[in-house]
């Protein structure tokens, strides 16, 4: 079973994403355990303060090193973690190969930032991996943590009903997924390509590959350059 601990100052933001759909089923099947850790439980004053003003001045508050260190130290006393991940806009960009790699691990910590960020010493001494989900800024790291969890959990063996489904997703081979169709085969004169109705598996696979390449060339040619470089 994979175990994921998510450290946050807003636990309520993560209740919904993990209570529905694929992640919910994975938890119910005991394929993944996700614990949401309230960082304020590790604050040592009556106000449960976890942020303070930045040295040198400037707008915005900074998440303090002490409660985060206490929290991570406490978690590490219970199990060994493969990665301690900080969700941050200036981290490495999340992509499918990274999700694939993380899905092979057993224990992960995810730290959700807030305010102007975290004390830099946390990044220097406690964090092992920094991940971004895009070149934009959100109010906190909770939504990125939910995205990262979903991208990892769906890859765990036994989570999806069809175990080959995740392998045919977009980006697995640096190609976008081909077009997909379902019933009816003819709707308002809009017809499904005949090859998909033929039952010829070889021809269907060839059609799907050709259209994956074509779609990638039109929409994400940068992905094809990665294939060339590899």
Image (cartoon, rainbow, N blue to C red):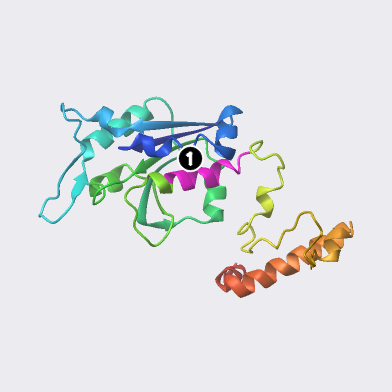
x%, y% of residue 174? 61, 63
Q: Position of residue 8 (x, y in %)?
A: 33, 38
Q: Using the rendered view, name the quadrant where residue 58 is placed.
A: bottom left
Residue appearing at x 37%, y 29% in the figure:
75
Which element carries disc 1, helix, strand or loop?
loop
Q: Quadrant of the C terminus?
A: bottom right
Q: Quadrant of residue 136?
A: bottom left
The N terminus: image quadrant = top right
Q: Residues within 10 Å of mark 1 (few under 14, many from 20)?
A: some
The spot of residue 49 in percent (x, y) is 19, 35
Left or right: 139 with respect to 230? Answer: left
Residue under numbered circle 1: 17
Position of residue 212 relative to residue 18, above or below, is: below
| Above or below, 123 relative to 58 | above
In the foreground, 18 or 93: 18
Q: Residue at x 69, y 48 (%)?
A: 165
Residue at (62% x, 58% y) in the render: 170
Viewer-proximal residue among 163 and 161: 161
Q: Which residues are magenta?
A: 145-156
Figure check: 105 above or below 87: above
Tell me, yes or no, whether the highlighted magenta stretch contains residue 121.
no
């Amino acid at each position: 079973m994979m175990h994921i601990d998510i450290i946050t100052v807003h636990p309520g933001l993560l209740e919904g994403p993990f209570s529905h759909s694929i992640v919910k089923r994975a938890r119910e099947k005991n394929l993944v355990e996700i614990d949401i850790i309230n960082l304020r439980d590790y604050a040592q004053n009556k106000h449960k303060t976890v942020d303070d003003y930045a040295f040198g001045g400037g707008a915005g508050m900074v998440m303090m090193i002490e409660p985060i260190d206490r929290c991570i130290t406490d978690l590490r006393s219970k199990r060994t973690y493969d990665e301690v991940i900080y969700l941050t806009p200036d981290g490495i960009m999340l992509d499918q190969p990274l999700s694939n790699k993380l899905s092979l691990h057993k224990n992960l910590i995810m730290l959700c930032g807030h305010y102007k960020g975290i004390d830099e010493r946390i990044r220097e001494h406690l964090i092992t991996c920094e991940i971004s989900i895009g070149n934009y800024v959100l109010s906190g790291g909770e939504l990125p943590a939910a995205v990262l969890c979903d991208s990892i959990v769906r890859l765990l063996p036994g989570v999806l009903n069809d175990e080959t489904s995740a392998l045919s997703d977009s980006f697995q081979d640096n190609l976008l997924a081909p077009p997909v169709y379902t019933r009816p085969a003819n709707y308002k004169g809009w017809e499904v390509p005949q090859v998909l109705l033929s039952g010829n598996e070889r021809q269907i696979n060839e059609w799907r590959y050709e259209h994956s390449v074509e779609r990638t060339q039109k929409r994400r040619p940068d992905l094809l350059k990665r294939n060339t470089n590899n």
